[in-house]
Image (cartoon, rainbow, N blue to C red):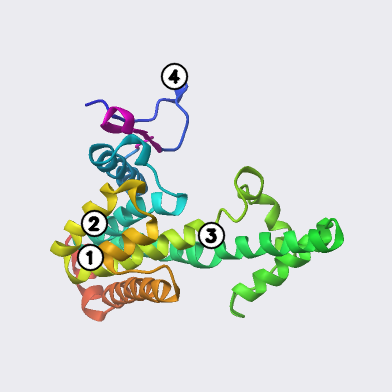
Amino acid sequence: GNFIDVYPDPENGKQPGGYCYELRALQSPALIFMNYNGLISDQKTLTHELGHGIHFYLMGQSVDYLYCNAPIYEMEVPSTFNEELFVDYVVENSDQDTAVAVLSQHVGEYQNYFCFQPMITEFEWKAHQLCAENGNASGAELNGLWTELFKEYRSDSIEYHAEDSAEWTYIIQFYLTNNYYTFNYAVSKAITLALFKQYKEDPETFNENYIAYLSAGSTMTPEEKLDKYFGIEINRQLFEDAMDVVELRIRQLEELDREANSPETKSAVESLNVYS
């Protein structure tokens, strides 16, 4: 239906990246902007944007346009939920090397969501405190604050380089978004993984509730919707449930790695190489 602009076209001015633009007022499918080169990362991006598209479409078909919205962290739930489905698909349908690569990259994203983004938020909060107390803050003070938090959020096995002390200057959310914007990522991902845990336990029941959840828009608060359809609250338990899925992914990756390095697998690979 010409709702997805798929392929790169830099010669005619098409910009890189991808995003989803809603057409809820028209009760129409969303417009998706892509630069698809056939890579697995492109497939994952398309899956992500289609999560937004499905969300926008269900709201547009179900509630008045005035209620076709949600806070930032809730908007990211269907797109990142789609990513979890995508990872499952790759693990089940791809060769071992591809599955390991996708799982490794995905587990790394968990570190970004649950460690780096909250660290950015805490840095921002402490920087505001520093300015409130002293009237301003020097670059050296902010570098020191970043270094302190960086070491706190990392284990001793990760080496710290002094040059990283000014890394905060590269965080564009400080300059281009509302205060504490990055913590939305952590809350959103925690909700996504808690939902995904329920999906894995009972897909049929989950799917019915999930469609109703995405369709409701802002006729209820996010907290009311989560409680009504899934019995979930935004609290510590939410993050504990999310960590269960993180642990599941790590176990999947370890199992694939063991299989790849088992004597049987190596023997089979060597046989194939000889045959080739």
* Label 2 sits on residue: 210
Q: In front: 49, or 97?
A: 49
When the figure is inspected, residue 263 is found, relative to residue 201, above or below; the finding is: below
Percent position (x, y) of residue 214? 28, 50
Please tell me how crowded label 2 is: few (under 14), some (14-19), or many (20+) other residues with Cα within 10 Å.
some
Q: Of callouts 1 and 4, which one flags the residue occurring earlier in the amino acid sequence?
A: 4
> What kind of residue is marked 3?
Phe
Would you say the residues marked 2 and 1 are in contact, meaning their CB atoms lie under 8 Å apart? Answer: yes
The local secondary structure at tag 3 comes to helix
Label 4 vs label 2, nearer the camera: 2
Q: Say whether residue 72 is magenta.
A: no
Q: In front: 269, or 140?
A: 140
> What kind of residue is marked 2?
Tyr
Residue drawn at (49%, 67%), measured in percent from left and top?
Answer: 114
Q: In front: 158, or 139?
A: 139
* Label 1 sits on residue: 199
Q: Of callouts 4 and 2, which one flags the residue occurring earlier in the amino acid sequence?
A: 4
Q: Say whether residue 24 is magenta.
A: yes
> What kind of residue is marked 4?
Asn
Q: In front: 220, or 206?
A: 220
Please tell me how crowded label 3 is: few (under 14), some (14-19), or many (20+) other residues with Cα within 10 Å.
many
Q: Which mark is residue 12?
A: 4
Q: Of callouts 3 and 1, which one flags the residue occurring earlier in the amino acid sequence?
A: 3
Q: CA distance from mark 3 to mark 1?
A: 24 Å
**Which quadrant does the N terminus fall into?**
top left
* Label 3 sits on residue: 183
Label 3 vs label 4, nearer the camera: 3
The local secondary structure at tag 1 comes to helix
Q: Which residues are magenta?
A: 19-36
Q: Of callouts 2 and 3, which one flags the residue occurring earlier in the amino acid sequence?
A: 3
